[in-house]
Amino acid sequence: DVKVTQSSRYLVKRTGEKVFLECVQDMDHENMFWYRQDPGLGLRLIYFSYDVKMKEKGDIPEGYSVSREKKERFSLILESASTNQTSMYLCASSPQTGGRFGANVLTFGAGSRLTVL
Amino acid sequence: QKEVEQNSGPLSVPEGAIASLNCTYSDRGSQSFFWYRQYSGKSPELIMFIYSNGDKEDGRFTAQLNKASQYVSLLIRDSQPSDSATYLCAVPLSGGGADGLTFGKGTHLIIQP
């Protein structure tokens, strides 16, 4: 019954490494999101996409990029990982339709906890 | 930038009592408000949303909205230990919804048996 799947639950990387976080949803949702969650800072939006090959910056895009080549897959890329990117990364998706507020009903994946040493 | 404020808690409530969680928001133009629940080590899940002034009930949960005062509340009646979690209040970044939600930092609720 898993609907949003994040490929890695735990990752440990070194400073300067390129990191890929993968997210796949099977609900045919148009909208996909990447958030990071940190103690005391809450959930913060990194990037989002409302269509294939479309991407928009969220509140904290610096140091990240994204890729959406297929509707079901949204990848977060850390070009050169830094220690301040140690965090829990949450992918989410929502439908474009589904009523007036359907687009705001986010389904989250289980999260990817990234540690950068 | 839209902001959502919540008391981080922890809020401790005895089992069977009413838990009251509050949230204020900065953008007077916000139209809809969402409550998500996050258990420790898990991802957030939607509880309910509200867009009209007044109360909206769903089982033991009641959302209350006061747009004039820019606050929204979540009441949990007959609180159970399984309600212990962090509750996140959120507003859409835009009316269309395709650009996601801004979340508050959450209130940690503890239901004491």
Image (cartoon, coloured by chain):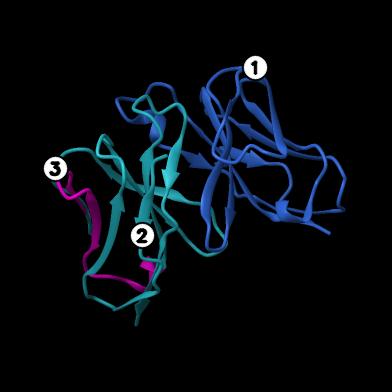
Q: Amino acid at mark 2?
A: Gln
Q: Residue at x 49, y 40 (%)?
A: A107
Question: Tag 3: Cα neighbours inside 10 Å, few (<14), some, or many (≥20)?
Answer: some
The residue that label 2 is drawn on is B6
The residue that label 1 is drawn on is A53
The residue that label 3 is drawn on is B53
Give the colour chain A carries in the figure: blue
Answer with mark 3 or mark 2, whichever residue precedes in sequence: 2
Q: In screen coordinates, is A32 left or right of B59?
A: right
Q: Amino acid at mark 1?
A: Lys
Query: Over which residues does the magenta segment extend?
Result: B63-84
Q: Tell which of A88 and B17 is nearer to you.
A: A88
Residues at discs 3 and 2 both on one chain: yes
Q: For marks 3 and 2, give the one nearer the viewer.
A: 2
The magenta stretch spans residue B7: no
Work out whether B50 lies above or below A48.
below
- Among the chains pictured, the one given cyan colouring is B
Q: Amino acid at mark 3?
A: Asn
- What residue occupies the far left of the structure in this picture? B54
Q: Residue at x 21, y 70 (%)?
A: B18
Q: In screen coordinates, is B98 left or right of B4?
A: right
Please, what secondary structure does the residue beneath circle 2 have? strand
Q: Residue B68 in the image: x percent, y percent?
A: 14, 45
Q: Tell which of A83 and B56 is nearer to you.
A: A83
The magenta stretch spans residue B77: yes
Q: Residue A86 in the image: x percent, y percent?
A: 72, 55
Question: Tag 2: Cα neighbours inside 10 Å, few (<14), some, or many (≥20)?
Answer: some
Q: For marks 2 and 1, give the one nearer the viewer.
A: 2
Q: Residue B47 in the image: x percent, y percent?
A: 34, 50
Please, what secondary structure does the residue beneath circle 3 have? loop
Q: Quick one: quadrant of the N terminus of chain A?
A: top right
